[in-house]
Structures are given as structure tokens and as C-alpha cells.
């Protein structure tokens, strides 16, 4: 049987996508609007999607669809219970960002602990030019070595970051919802960490897990990094904490709504020592190619009768 593959949002993946090793037809679209989904998938047996959502009302109109291959790890864009009820398998990408996300976290950590953005801005704005001393020391600088990194979500990515941090001379402590030997409780992590980095999934239990009370529990010299999901942090509370000096800085690669077409509290340019990047921590060229290769392998294994990375 020839498989019909449709990739709904090809522009989200900056890598080569090789042809699967079975009889198939293949169509890709750079972007797909919500009203275009059903028509484009009407004859598809396999759908590839990264950001285009497939909800129950859409799946009800696609009787030929057998597989949704998500070109990402997160699958919240898919109505998984409905897909399962209709016999549609959902597979995702796993363990591909083992270098790119940790490197992004470490980069944010150095930039924030050393106040690089503020110093670079002062140079560009001519502030250094007016200094009486050749060393312009207007913003606090803290060493990485000897500080404590708290990792929330101690899975593969969290552990990879921990190894890098230890190589830099940091003490590493971790917290995870699933008990593991040697981890600390959440309150201890908040209290003792100089840097906190979040790597937990977004669930009803983790939504706004960092709010006003948690920010007050952190050290005033601490920084918060989030490359996981925007909803893990109360963004209004964080903006207020940064403006008041409740914590020393934050680095975010994710926001609650992406892109922030209607604005976001963390886009206020007056917030000090804040770096926001546009959901790119995962997106090194090397990582995207690993993702692409795994995506095609997932499809081939499903067609071959030995599915992998199935999401229930």
C-alpha cells in the first residue's frame, strides 16, 4: 500500500528531510492555516506537524489518517485521546536536544551572572565613554565557579546540564516530581540555588510553579532560566520581581503565548537583566538534523510494523 505523507509546516524545521524508504507520495507546505488543515490532509495516511494543531473536530474529518508524526517533543497540539479512539497513532521526537538546550542554558547563565547585556548596552549608548575609570563597574558581576545550580526536572536534559555545570566548578542540586536518589525538595532548591533552570513539562500541576511566593523564597542574587515551557512561571510576578530587585535576573526562551502577538509582561524594555530569546534553545543546526532524521525513522518504523516513540 502506498502511503500518503503530508508535512503541514515545513518552515519550522531547518534541516534536510530525507525520503522514507517505502512506497509513498509526499507533499509539504511551508505553513498551514487552521482552515486549510482538513483539505490538505483529506487523503493523507501520515501527517507530519510541528506547530499545527490537530484537534478532535479536525481528526473526525480525516478517516484515512493513521499516523501523526510530531516533529517535536511536545505533543500538546494533538488531541491524543481522540486520536487513540480513532486508531491514529501519535509519535514524537525524543533525546535530540542533548547538546543544544544545555549550551543555551549555560550561555544564558554566563550572560546573566556577568550582566553582559547591561554592559554591552552601556558601551553602545556611550556610557563607558564618560567613565572616569577605564574599568566601568556599574553592574554586579558574579562568578559561576563556586555557585549552586538548581535543576527543576532532573531528566536527560537536566542531567546533561548538571554535568556541564559541575565541569565549571558549580555545585549541582536537583528536584524532580518523580523521586530519585540524591535530589532535594523544591523549597530547598529555591532557597539554596544561585541559578535555577527549569526543565519540567507543563501540566496542571506545574502551571505557574514559580510564582510570587517562590520568587520571594529565592536569593536576591539568584537568576531564573526557563527553556522548557512558558506557563511554568507567572510572568507578571516575574516582571515585578525583576523590577523590584527581588531576584537578580532571568533568561527565558519560552513565553505563555508564542509568538507574543498581543504583548507579554516580559517584553517590557525597562526590566533589568532579562534576556528573552524566541524559542530557539532547541534549534542548533546539528540538533535540527538529528530531529529530522529521527522523524523519518519514526515514520519508517511505524510503517514497518515496529512503532517507536508512541505517545499515549
Image (tube, grey):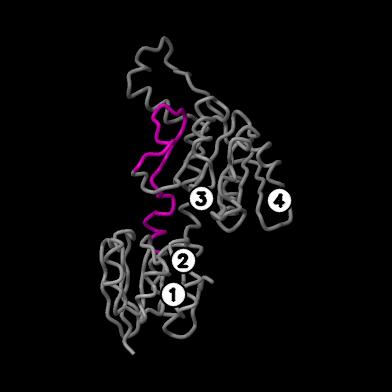
User: Would you say residue 133 sits in the magenta stretch?
Assistant: no
The segment highlighted magenta reads 262-290
Q: Are marks 2 and 4 in contact (CB under 8 Å)?
A: no
User: Would you say residue 263 sits in the magenta stretch?
Assistant: yes
Label 4: few (<14), some or many (≥20) within 10 Å? some
Q: Give the secondary structure at mark 3.
A: helix
**Which callout, 3 or 4, points at the residue further toward the start of the chain?**
3
Q: Are marks 1 and 2 in contact (CB under 8 Å)?
A: yes
Q: Residue at x 44, y 85 (%)?
A: 304
Foreground of the two, 182 or 51: 51
Mark 1 lies on residue: 298
Q: CA distance from mark 2 to mark 4?
A: 27 Å
Residue 185 placement, left or right of 40: right
**Which callout, 1 or 2, points at the residue further toward the start of the chain?**
2
Q: Give the secondary structure at mark 4.
A: loop
Mark 2 lies on residue: 93
**Which callout, 3 or 2, points at the residue further toward the start of the chain?**
2
Percent x, y for residue 169? Answer: 62, 40
Mark 3 lies on residue: 102
Amino acid at each position: 500500500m502506498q502511503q500518503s505523507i503530508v508535512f503541514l509546516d515545513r518552515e519550522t524545521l531547518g534541516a534536510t528531510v530525507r525520503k522514507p524508504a517505502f512506497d509513498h507520495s509526499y507533499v509539504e507546505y511551508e505553513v498551514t492555516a487552521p482552515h486549510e488543515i482538513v483539505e490538505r490532509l483529506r487523503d493523507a495516511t501520515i501527517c507530519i506537524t510541528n506547530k499545527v494543531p490537530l484537534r478532535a473536530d479536525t481528526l473526525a474529518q480525516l478517516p484515512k489518517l493513521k499516523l501523526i508524526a510530531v516533529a517535536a517533543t511536545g505533543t500538546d497540539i494533538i488531541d491524543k485521546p481522540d486520536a487513540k479512539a480513532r486508531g491514529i497513532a501519535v509519535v514524537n521526537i525524543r533525546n535530540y536536544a542533548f547538546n543544544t538546550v544545555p549550551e543555551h542554558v549555560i550561555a544564558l547563565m554566563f550572560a546573566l551572572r556577568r550582566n553582559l547585556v547591561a554592559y554591552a548596552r552601556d558601551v553602545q549608548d556611550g556610557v563607558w565613554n564618560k567613565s572616569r575609570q577605564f574599568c566601568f563597574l556599574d553592574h554586579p558581576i558574579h562568578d559561576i565557579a563556586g555557585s549552586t545550580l538548581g535543576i527543576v526536572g532532573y531528566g536527560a536534559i537536566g542531567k546533561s546540564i548538571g554535568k556541564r555545570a559541575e565541569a565549571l566548578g558549580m555545585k549541582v542540586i536537583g528536584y524532580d516530581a518523580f523521586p530519585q536518589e540524591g535530589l532535594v525538595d523544591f523549597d530547598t532548591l529555591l532557597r539554596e540555588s544561585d541559578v535555577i533552570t527549569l526543565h519540567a513539562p507543563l501540566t496542571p500541576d506545574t502551571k505557574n510553579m514559580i510564582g510570587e511566593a517562590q520568587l520571594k523564597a529565592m536569593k536576591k542574587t539568584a537568576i531564573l532560566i526557563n527553556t522548557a515551557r512558558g506557563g511554568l512561571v507567572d510572568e507578571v510576578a516575574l516582571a515585578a520581581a525583576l523590577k523590584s530587585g527581588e531576584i537578580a535576573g532571568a533568561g527565558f526562551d519560552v513565553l505563555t503565548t508564542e509568538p507574543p502577538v498581543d504583548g507579554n509582561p516580559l517584553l517590557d524594555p525597562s526590566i533589568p537583566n532579562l534576556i528573552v530569546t524566541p524559542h530557539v534553545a532547541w534549534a542548533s543546526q546539528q540538533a535540527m538534523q538529528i530531529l529530522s532524521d529521527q522523524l523519518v525513522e519514526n515514520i519508517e518504523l511505524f510503517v514497518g510494523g515496529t512503532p517507536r516513540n508512541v505517545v499515549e
